[in-house]
Image (tube, rainbow, N blue to C red):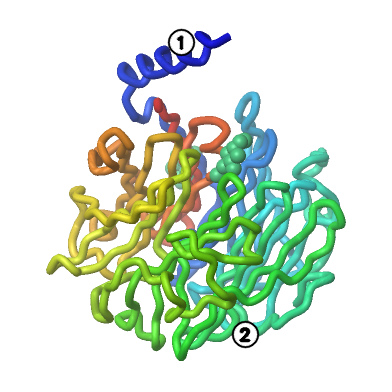
């Protein structure tokens, strides 16, 4: 009994030596035509999430132009089997909601609670909540038909059972907790003056309840890099902005919660009072002044070894670069430039993503002038500074989104992207990268 684990460790170590982090196979799937017009409504960094695997199926949420043509979009939901083998995509449009606001804030976010209900929230920029959820647990008890009527329900402007405020709302995000409940996070207020709230859906009662305001602006607002639940811990990192002008973004902040957002701790482990404000002691981890070319809502992830990873840009070294922020399991933060071959400056260009698998970290970084998205890999053994290119996606004009669940369960990095090019040719796509880890 004592020998077995150590033999496994040795065996795994040998495997890792011969198969370093690499992409072994790539598959591409067209999902739909991307909407008509110059406004991006699909593939924006703050969509949490657009691509999720739950059980044997993968789900994708996207907008497509409806029959009324330019400026009229439907929320669409796709599914395909991914286990044990990959099936064809099936999609349907929600035809009872005509999305008309041509604004890049007005994206779709999707969450799936442990009871198999699919939750969608969409079409916000400082407006009342738009929310709908499947009436049945359709990701658990799989309906044979994939139609709006198998989804059921209608759009509501509050979360059933919970208490607002529900407006002016922007940037809804969903994240499942360790027990299968679903958290929803969003901003109330506006750019330069906003607060962030959390609500919780119970998979056992089917009701929402209020967790409360957890971030509060001080004549400014937090722009979070993500809202990440990993092994019972909830992580959030952010920058703060004073005005709608992105050049007023400043500093890197971090907090974590061990009770799904009810109470919060600074990186030191010290409990902080709620709501957290930019002046809450211990919350600011790195000081970066305004006018440092920080882009808000970049990326973050956590890994199974207790590490937190953040991605943000700034020009503290003289020219704008992407930085990897690392918090080790024992609470030490470092910040290192990601020295890879990308066009400069990356300021205000498309945002990237981070994804981890064990001791491997991937930075999925768009290069707008080259119309590419490249997956860069690094390892804990290389102090996450041994970045190498694993794969590139051509003809990209948007921000990649990651299926974290699928990576966790299958060693496939599944990426939702928006192509460049004219309407009619430009697709939303899913790319599957099989990884050797
Ligand atoms: C995606 O659609 C384009 C245009 O219709 C087509 O040329 C291409 O082969 C399709 N790609 C895949 C992977 O089906
Ligand atoms: C990955 O799966 C493990 C075990 O199934 C779970 O503890 C962990 O929270 C999952 N992480 C993500 C990112 O889904």
Residue 274 position within the rendered picture, expressed as x and y whole percent measured from the top left: 59, 75
At x 54%, y 30%, the residue is 410
Q: Are marks 1 and 2 in contact (CB under 8 Å)?
A: no
Name the side, left or right, on which 139 lies relative to 99. Answer: right
Which dot marks residue 7?
Answer: 1
* Quadrant placement of the N terminus: top right
Q: Secondary structure at mark 2?
A: loop
Marker count (numbered):
2
Q: Nearer the viewer, residue 120 or 149?
A: 120
Image vertical order of residue 154 relative to residue 8, above or below? below
Residue 40 position within the rendered picture, expressed as x and y whole percent measured from the top left: 46, 67
Sequence-first tag of 1 and 2: 1
At x 66%, y 64%, the residue is 184
Residue 328 position within the rendered picture, expressed as x and y whole percent measured from the top left: 38, 48
- Which residue is disc 2 drawn over? 168
Q: Secondary structure at mark 1?
A: helix
Name the side, left or right, on which 201 lies relative to 206. Answer: left
At x 74%, y 47%, the residue is 114
Name the side, left or right, on which 36 lies relative to 199. Answer: left
At x 44%, y 30%, the residue is 434
Q: CA distance from mark 1 to mark 2?
A: 57 Å
């Amino acid at each position: 009994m004592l020998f077995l684990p150590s033999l496994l460790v040795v065996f795994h170590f040998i495997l890792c030596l011969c198969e370093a982090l690499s992409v072994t196979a790539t598959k591409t799937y067209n999902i739909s035509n991307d909407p008509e017009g110059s406004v991006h409504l699909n593939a924006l960094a703050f969509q949490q999430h657009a691509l999720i695997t739950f059980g044997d199926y993968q789900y994708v949420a996207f907008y497509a132009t409806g029959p009324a043509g330019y400026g009229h979009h439907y929320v669409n939901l796709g599914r395909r089997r991914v286990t044990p083998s990959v099936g064809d995509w099936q999609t349907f449009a929600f035809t009872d909601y005509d999305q008309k606001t041509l604004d890049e804030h007005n994206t779709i976010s999707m969450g799936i609670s442990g009871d198999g209900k699919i939750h969608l929230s969409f079409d916000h920029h400082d407006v009342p909540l738009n929310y709908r959820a499947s009436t049945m647990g359709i990701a658990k008890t799989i309906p044979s038909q994939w139609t709006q009527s198998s989804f059921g329900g209608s759009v509501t402007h509050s979360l059933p059972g919970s208490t607002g405020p529900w407006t002016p709302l922007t940037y809804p995000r969903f994240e499942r907790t360790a027990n299968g409940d679903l958290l929803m996070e969003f901003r109330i207020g506006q750019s330069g003056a906003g607060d962030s709230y959390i609500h919780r859906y119970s998979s056992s009662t089917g009701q929402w309840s209020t967790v409360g305001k957890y971030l509060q602006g001080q004549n400014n607002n937090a722009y979070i890099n993500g809202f990440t639940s990993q092994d019972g811990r909830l992580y959030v990192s952010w920058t703060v902005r004073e005005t709608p002008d992105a050049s007023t973004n400043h500093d890197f902040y971090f907090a974590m919660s061990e009770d799904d957002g009810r109470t919060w701790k600074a990186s030191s482990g010290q409990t902080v009072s709620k709501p957290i404000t930019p002046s809450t002691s211990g919350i600011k981890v790195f000081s970066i002044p305004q006018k440092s070319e920080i882009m808000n809502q970049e990326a973050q992830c956590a890994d199974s070894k207790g590490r937190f990873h953040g991605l943000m840009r700034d020009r503290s070294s003289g020219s704008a670069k992407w930085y990897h922020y690392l918090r080790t399991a024992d609470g030490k933060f470092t910040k290192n430039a990601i020295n890879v071959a990308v066009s400069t400056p990356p300021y205000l260009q498309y945002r990237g993503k981070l994804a981890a698998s064990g001791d491997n970290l991937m930075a999925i970084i768009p290069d707008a002038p080259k119309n590419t998205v490249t997956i860069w890999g690094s390892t804990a053994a290389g102090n996450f500074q041994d970045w190498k290119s694993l794969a590139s996606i051509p003809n990209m004009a948007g921000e990649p989104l990651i299926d974290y669940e699928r990576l966790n369960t299958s060693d496939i990095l599944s990426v939702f992207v928006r192509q460049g090019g004219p309407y009619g040719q430009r697709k939303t796509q899913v790319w599957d990268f099989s990884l050797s880890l």
